[in-house]
Image (cartoon, rainbow, N blue to C red):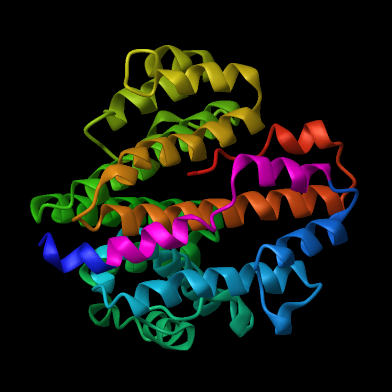
Amino acid sequence: MAEEYTYAVARIRALENSLLTGSVIDQLISCQNEEQCIHLLEEKGWGDTDTAGNGDAMLAREEEKIWGVVKDLHIDMKHFDVLSLPKEFQNLKAAVKEAAAGPAGADIYYEGMSMSGSELSEIIRNRDFDRLPDSMKSAASEAYDTLLHTGDGQLCDVIIDKACLEAVLDAGREAGRSGYGVIRDYAESVVCIADIKTAVRSARTKKSQDFLMKALVDTESFSASYLAKAAAQGEDAVTEYLLTTDYRDAAESLSESPSAFERWCDDRMIESLQSQKYETFTIGPVIAYVIARQNEIKTVRLILTGKANGLPDESIRERVRQMYV
């Protein structure tokens, strides 16, 4: 396994030198407007000739570059299931709603997934759920029936989102059994943070404990039933419960502001990957690089959106994410 990733890690180490640093992020925040930000990013090699001056197109191109690197490294894409599954399930969600409510346009689907949007939509309309992966079958059937019979789009989302988190957790645990601990740990963090977000949002909107049990997933860090009980009692109870877990830092960010909490969630992910900077013979640095690139694209999008909407620099700064380098 060590020799398998020697070249890949060497390539990633070279690419890490082009990742955005905290100082570059500060430069972007200090730009006078969105156009200046785009120009600075283009100087750093972001986008290409086809995306000149277009922020959205530039970010889409950067996402394509990430997977272009992975393809060039000839690494089995199964190792990236924990990253692709959320998009796969988002497409399923779109297909369920399209099948129930009628055509909504091709641009509602992520491209490059294992099944196309039209294929998913056809499967749902024909109730041919056996054609779906095992992780999707039950959720697709339940969500579709729920939407048809109740018209409750939120409950439809909850059913599919929970199935997605369970699939991510399963993929992470399977990777862990195969010796890829970084994937297992990342999957655990993804699901735990999603649970925290759901609990906080549900506490603020006074959702019932029954609703929460439909949405939350058991992990090694959290008991879904305990977290659901806390959220049903209110945000203070969620904070008290978090203080008893490995995610106690989330409680402090929650008390600061919603944007501070969102930032903490992403920063926690990046912090969990820092050890991969010192790995040499595993897939860990490749996984970390992909996540780091996605994180910087998200951060740049936040900055560009802030500039486009005339937000003060301080307001933008409190939203930006920690960089990997």
Q: Nearer the viewer, residue 110 or 45?
A: 45
Q: Nearer the viewer, residue 56 or 11?
A: 11
Q: In this view, does 19 lie to the left or right of 211?
A: right
Q: Position of residue 310 (x, y in %)?
A: 90, 46
Q: In this view, does 252 lie above or below 316?
A: above
Q: Which residue is drawn at 54% across and 42% down?
A: 323
Can residue 211 be seen here? The reply is: no
Q: Residue at x 59, y 45 (%)?
A: 21
Quarter location, residue 13? bottom left
Q: In this view, does 178 lie above or below 48?
A: above
Q: Which of 37 and 154 is in front in this view?
A: 37
Q: Residue at x 66, y 41 (%)?
A: 23
Q: What stretch is highlighted in magenta?
A: 8-30
Q: Is residue 38 left or right of residue 228?
A: right
Q: Nearer the viewer, residue 284 or 147?
A: 284
Q: Is residue 296 above or below residue 1?
A: above
Quarter location, residue 282? bottom left
Q: Within the magenta stretch, is there residue 19?
A: yes
Task: Say which quadrant the N terminus sits in.
Answer: bottom left
Q: Where is residue 222 in the image (x, y as percent from the top left)?
A: 29, 28
Q: In this view, does 75 lie to the left or right of 111?
A: left
Q: Is the magenta stretch mostly helix, strand or loop?
A: helix
Quarter location, residue 54? bottom right
Can residue 182 be seen here? The reply is: yes
Q: Within the magenta stretch, is there residue 202?
A: no
Q: Position of residue 14 (x, y in %)?
A: 42, 61
Q: Where is residue 169 in the image (x, y as percent from the top left)?
A: 25, 49
